């Protein structure tokens, strides 16, 4: 007999100035990507391709087909706007310039 108990999960997405954490129930066997698409996020953030955006569970990147467990928080990630190494270089250069004046 299959387990028909619904899973209690959360789906999260954040942008500068607006964050959403949605708690809801999904059927046992639901995958991480299915949960994202079943959430209200695609209707709130129309400019995001939730079918292709990278996803993770509690900060660890996962495959779309990863089955969920009760208590999981599925996170939708955004692309980086700038390479972290390049950002550190820019900050260091700005700091050196400021200290030189």
Image: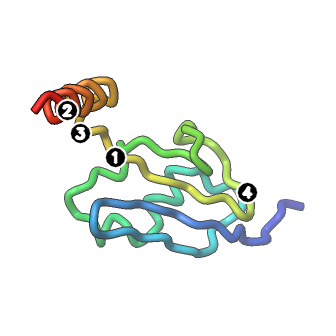
Q: Circle 1 is placed at which residue position? A: 78
- The kind of secondary structure element at disc 1 is loop
* Residue at 74 percent of width and 63 percent of height: 70
x, y percent for residue 17: 28, 68
Question: Where is 76 relative to 17, above or below?
Answer: above
Specify whether 12 is left or right of 87. right
**Residue 61 — which label?**
none
- The kind of secondary structure element at disc 3 is loop
Q: Circle 4 is placed at which residue position? A: 69
x, y percent for residue 78: 34, 46
Task: Report the Cα–Cα distance between label 2 and label 4.
Answer: 52 Å
x, y percent for residue 83: 28, 28
The disc, 1 or 2, on the residue closer to the chain's N-terminal end is 1
Task: Report the Cα–Cα distance between label 1 and label 2.
Answer: 34 Å
Q: Are marks 3 and 4 in contact (CB under 8 Å)?
A: no
Q: Quadrant of the N terminus?
A: bottom right
Task: Report the Cα–Cα distance between label 3 and label 4.
Answer: 32 Å
x, y percent for residue 34: 51, 55
Q: Circle 3 is placed at which residue position? A: 81
């Amino acid at each position: 007999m299959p387990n028909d108990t619904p899973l209690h999960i959360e789906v999260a997405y954040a942008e500068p100035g607006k964050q959403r954490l949605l708690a809801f129930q999904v059927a046992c066997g639901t995958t991480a990507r299915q949960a994202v698409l079943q959430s209200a996020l695609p209707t709130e953030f129309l400019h995001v391709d939730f079918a292709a955006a990278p996803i993770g569970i509690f900060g660890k990147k996962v495959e779309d087909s990863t089955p969920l467990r009760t208590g999981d928080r599925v996170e939708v990630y955004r692309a980086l706007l700038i390479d972290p190494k390049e950002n550190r270089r820019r900050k260091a250069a700005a700091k050196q310039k400021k200290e030189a004046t």
